[in-house]
Amino acid sequence: MSLIKRWMEEQEEQDVFINALKAVIENEEIDNEISLGISKKILDDESIDNLSDKQINVFNKYIDPHLTPECDSDECLGNGKIQMIDLPEAYNQKFELGGLYCEECVNYKIRLQNLMDEDD
Ligand SMILES: [Zn+2]
């Protein structure tokens, strides 16, 4: 793989991570002050490279699980987890759909809603 391609992929992964973390913070999933402070530092730096070992531990324990939460559906059509890349959209649809769902469930529920709208 060329270096520039690898660099671009890393940038993309970083964007996915930062956008997911932003969505988590904006939706006030993290209410612990220390975790919140560390999250904001990550967003400012756009990286976790500047965190201390202690901060990394807090991140792994209290922040990371929010980045790939479980799908709220009892009969999940995906693998039960919401992927980091789908998290901002899941939060966008949360109010409308009444829960935090994985991409498969979001798509299914939107299709269902559209079908019901057509009946009106
Ligand atoms: Zn699901």
Image: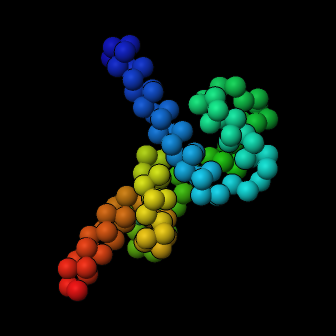
Q: Which color scheme did the rendering employ for the protein?
A: rainbow
Asked if 53 appears above or below 83 in the picture, the reply is: above
Quadrant that contains the N terminus:
top left
Q: Quadrant of residue 60?
A: top right
Residue found farthest to the bottom: 120
Asked if 90 appears above or below 67 in the picture, the reply is: below
Tell me if 115 is positioned left or right of 12 in this view. left
Residue 69 in sight: yes
Nearer to the camera, 6 or 38: 38
Quadrant that contains the C terminus:
bottom left
Nearer to the camera, 118 or 106: 118
User: Number of labelled discs?
Assistant: 0
**Image quadrant, ligand 1:** bottom left
Q: Residue at x 43, y 46 (%)?
A: 85
Image spot of residue 37 (x, y percent) = 75, 42
Q: Residue at x 79, y 35 (%)?
A: 54
Q: Residue at x 42, y 20 (%)?
A: 7
